[in-house]
Amino acid sequence: MKTNNTFSNQFARRQKGVGLPAAIFIITVMSAIAAAVFNLVQQNAQTYAEEVNLTRAFYAAESGAGFMMNTIFPPEEYPGYTNSPRCGITRTYSFVVSGLNQCEAEVSCSVIANAGSNYATIQSKGSCGDVIRTVQVRTVY
């Protein structure tokens, strides 16, 4: 009996301290995974915010181009537009509606003559914060 007890004591001595390194290894691996997931979530949030601002800037630029189109080609239903200056001006529109709040569009118009026709080029630069998008429209004037 004594030999069996000696064997189990020797086996127990060899097994001491294995759990602690294993636990430290598992905690380290789980911490690395958690840090990687946090980093991915943070990058995704930044990308989403940039996409929202890019879309808002695009729509601000598109709205500015539309306003200038109404200035160049006034709608018949709104005779007040007929007294507005046409091309050759630069206008800045600041938006206060909920989707374009704190965005603005800087719109310019120029006329180019080619082959007996006049072409108006409208360039609208929409900006929301640090993000800028440009829309250009060319039409017969």
Image (spheres, helix red, strand yellow):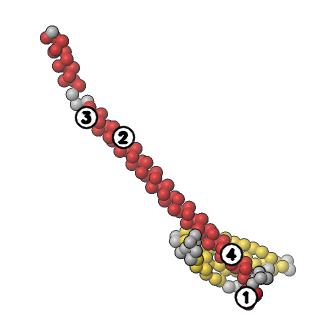
Residue 27 visible in the snapshot: yes
Give the numbered dot on residue 20: 3
Q: Of circles 1 and 4, which is in front? A: 1
Neighbor class of circle 1 (other Cα within 10 Å; few <14, some 14-19, many 20+) is few
**Residue type for callout 2:** Val
Label 3 element class: helix
x, y percent for residue 17: 22, 31
Q: Name the residue under label 2.
A: 29
Circle 1 residue: 80
Q: Which residue lies furthest to the left in this view?
A: 2
Mark 1 or mark 4: name the one nearer the start of the chain: 4
Question: What is the distance, in whole Å, between disc 1 and disc 4 at their CAs?
Answer: 19 Å
Quadrant where the C terminus sits is bottom right
Picture coordinates of residue 44, whole percent (x, y)? 49, 55
The circle on residue 34 is none
Direction from residue 76 to residue 98 in the image, left or right: left
Q: Is mark 1 on a helix, strand or loop?
A: helix
From the image, tell me which residue sits under label 4. 65
For image coordinates 84% across by 79% down, the residue present is 117
